[in-house]
Amino acid sequence: MTGYDGPSAVPPVRDAERLYDVVVVGGGAAGLSGALTLARARRSVLVVDSGRPRNAPAAGVHGYLGLDGTPPLELTAAGRAEVLRYGGEITAGTVTAAERLTAGGFRLSLDDGAAVAAGRLLVATGLADGLPGVPGLAELWGRDVLHCPYCHGWEVRDLPIGVLSTGPAAVRQALLWRQWSADVTLLRHIGPEPDDREYERLAARGVAVVDGEVTGLETSGGRLAGVRLAGGRTVPCRALVVAPRFTARAGFLAGLGLETAEQTAGGHVLGERVAADATGATAVPGVWVAGDVADLAGKVVGAAAAGVSAAAAINADLVEEETARAVAARAGLGREVLR
């Protein structure tokens, strides 16, 4: 999918004269859930989406109650239709820059030269996956090259699984994936050698350890069949687990002074995210984040929930602003009557 060309489309925004209550940047589970909540709150809301969902290669979304197994593009298509049903708008594009307006709110520049203004921003742009530099790996990402057992473990249950070690978290990964298959191999690759305790734990769970750098993948019928080692040996496997370095797609926020920060788990650096509080509010007033851009270890259902929470916080913030403005106007009217 490269854009919106069906009945749900609206023309690209061509000027910044219209001030939306909220512009949502990103049209995945987090962005569309936030937009739906805001549209139902009778807010003027625009979703700007590049139309390139990160989970598009996956066969289905999993762990989402009532929607388990739904193809990602079907889920987003249904979400767009729901947003439009309540008067929300969606346009195809990529936000390239953001700036604060002197009169309040924000101006967003799009990659096609268009611009749009918003009182509040909800950023749900997701992540970029920094994959290990093994030839052929990127082509199988999301199908046979995996990272999340809760997203993909059931689909590769009982198959031979290789875990590509690129850092100290690989042993923990191998032990976790052992829950889904008795045939798990830790491929040392460029990662550190396990210590004695780690070797003991791996052996106790029947996880084999293979030395040697992985130089490529073997495929059959377009699916993974094994990995090639530098010495020429092939290790059979039907799924390969990797540990990407995740980076929030948030470069356009630099103009607002909002940058990314490292997120860690178990002493391992997962990547770079946009820091925020529990509601998604960032250090920049008026800017919220939701989904993977704020939580590198999140899942689709969690991203959707985060979008709803952020939208509720944004609406409450707008209500406070509108109430303060109404109180000031009423006080001014009262002074006029007394004159």
Image (cartoon, rainbow, N blue to C red):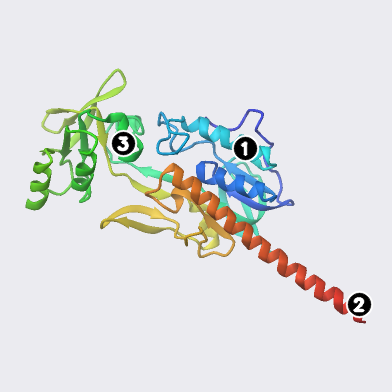
The secondary element bearing badge 1 is classed as helix
User: Residue at the location (54% across, 59% down)?
Assistant: 255
User: Residue at the location (59% across, 40% down)?
Assistant: 93
In the displayed orientation, state which residue is furthest to the bottom. 339
Q: Nearer the viewer, residue 122 or 207?
A: 207
Q: Nearer the viewer, residue 216 or 322?
A: 322
Q: Are marks 2 and 3 in contact (CB under 8 Å)?
A: no
Give percent across and percent down for residue 297. 37, 49
What's the CA distance linking mark 2 and mark 1? 47 Å
Whether residue 38 is situated above or below residue 51 in the rendered picture: below
Residue holding disc 3: 146
The amino acid pointed to by label 1 is Glu
Whether residue 34 is situated above or below residue 105 in the rendered picture: above
Give percent across and percent down for residue 219. 26, 23
- The numbered dot on residue 82 is 1
The amino acid pointed to by label 3 is Leu
Residue holding disc 2: 337
| Residue 219 in sight | yes
Give percent across and percent down for residue 106. 64, 58
The amino acid pointed to by label 2 is Val
What's the CA distance linking mark 1 and mark 3? 31 Å
Check disc 3: other Cα within 10 Å, few if <14, some if 14-19, many if 20+. many
The secondary element bearing badge 2 is classed as helix
Q: Are marks 2 and 1 in contact (CB under 8 Å)?
A: no
